[in-house]
Amino acid sequence: MPYLPLTPEGLDVLVSRTFREALSSSFEIRTPEDWFFLAYLLFGTFRDDDNGAAVVDRVSVANLFGVEPKLITQGLFRSNFLIAEFATRTGLQLHLTNSNSIVGKARTCRIVLNEHLQSLFEQCQIGQIEMVYFISGKSFSEREEQRRRILRADARANFPLSSLRPNFAVGTALNRQPPKSFAPFVKRLTQACEYVSTTMSGDKRTGQLRILSTLSTFFPPTYKQVRNSERLFTVGDSAAYLSSDVRDILFSGTWSADLSNAHLVIAARLWGLDDLLNLIEEKGSIWPYLMCELQLPIEKKPELKKVIYATVYGKPVPQLKGQITRELGREFTERYMLLPMTATLLEGREQHMDGIRSNGGITDAYGKFHALTDTGEKGESAVRTILSREVGSYEFKVMSAAAEIIRGSNGQVWIPLWLHDGIYVKFRDAARVENWKLKITEAVALESSKYGMPLKLVWELS
């Protein structure tokens, strides 16, 4: 949500009365503070990328329980004690994972619900007849919802972005797209929920339904800048974090434009991997070739793309292998690591990282030098951060060419969703779709040619 998520109002979401009453009768949840923490675990948007559980770092837990910030800095606060006390007094079963600063993993917490409660939870926010606010227990109020919609829309339109950053113009334009433009997509939320409920299972189904529930509260994404990247990211849960098949249901009738082979092409050019660049140009799209080499079914392409991203963006080999095993299965880990392309990428990556260490940083696509010492990271973490920033800067600069054409269309074309190396595009005039597509495609091709990167947009109607 555009306003601060770690406030009672920010997490006092609408749920079915049946679900809230079932929780209240099954557990000893008596205080607003307990409902607040429970809401964070169930509906909070600060989630772990790997397991989808709520992140319960010290700062977040302190905020949720009203602990004074100075106690954290003085080392007098232990979040695990508060979490354990919460579980004991409520009777809720919690599954906790440990933090690991070496590999950048935070502690996470998931509520373990029985089958009946889990089913009620997954259906508690969309398509329900009698709704109440989760923390307060008050009945649904149209006046209150209208007030919240106005606040969210205002916060989104005025979300602070630095004009000194190269992504300022794109981010501002995206955040000021009128919320009413997204109304057709909101109408498809129920259909998307039905699809998720019938085709997915386990943590994936729970996570996708949670995101769809968030979208039912406020659909338009809010974009933010981050410290060590030119990329734009969404605030909290958004359609950007839905799987592509679920997104295509919501954005039916819009066009998706993807920057083909983006990360591999950019990395190959920056790292001097001419053989890999030639292979990509020869194949046109690298994905059919990779799927064949790995003996992967086509429906696993999204998971394979995540693995490629992790390889290009510097994930250490042990963690990379772990991700492949989680995403694709253990048998594919060895296949991927034995690919000649993988060996080429990892060797080129290490040599480029050596150059970053020697030079103390990188110069991005905008000609600005970024020093390792300015990342706020230490050691190899700083090197990987700078490595990803360099690749991401070229990706954003090339995609900005598409955004520039769209911004100049006087509202004839707009972007419902920005996805780093791809966008969803809506055209007002069906008769001019092909003309606009050609203009956007040519602008991207021209920009990428400046860097010797054979990148092109691939269009598909959702």
Image (cartoon, rainbow, N blue to C red):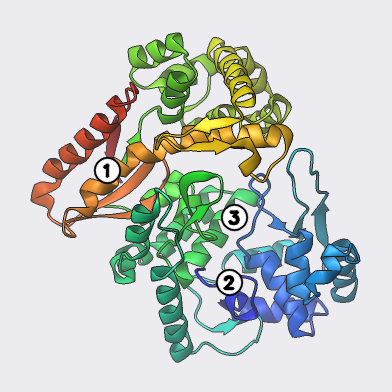
Q: Is residue 345 above or below residue 321?
A: above
- Can you see residue 393? yes
- Label 1, label 2: how far apart the Cα atoms are: 31 Å
Question: Pointer 2: residues within 10 angstroms few (<14), some, or many (20+)?
Answer: few
Does 341 appear above or below 94?
Answer: above
Residue for point 51% across, 51% down: 241
Residue type at the position of mark 2: Leu
Q: Earlier in the sequence, mark 1 or mark 3?
A: 3
When asked about the image quadrant of residue 137, the answer is bottom right
Q: Specify which label sits upstream in the sequence, 2 or 3.
A: 2
Give the camera-side residue of 257 and 174: 174
Q: Residue 144: give x, y in percent of width and height.
A: 48, 88
Q: Which mark is residue 207?
A: 3
Q: Secondary structure at mark 3?
A: helix
Distance between mark 1 and mark 3 Cα atoms: 31 Å
Q: Which residue appears farthest toward the left when viewing the image?
A: 431
Q: Tell whether 367 sits left or right of 140.
A: left
Q: Is residue 113 visible?
A: no
Give residue 227's position: percent from left, percent from top. 56, 50
Q: Are marks 1 and 3 in contact (CB under 8 Å)?
A: no
- The picture quadrant where one finds residue 123 is bottom right
| Residue 282 horizontal side relative to residue 159, left or right | left
In the rendered image, residue 395, in percent from the top left (x then y), is placed at: 41, 36
**Amino acid on which disc 3 is placed:** Gly
| Amino acid, disc 1 | Ala
The label shown at residue 402 is 1
Q: Residue at x 53, y 31 (%)?
A: 362
**Mark 2, residue position:** 4
Of marks 1 and 2, which one's residue comes earlier in the chain?
2
Vertical position of residue 302 compared to residue 352: above or below: below
On the rendered structure, is 78 left or right of 324?
right
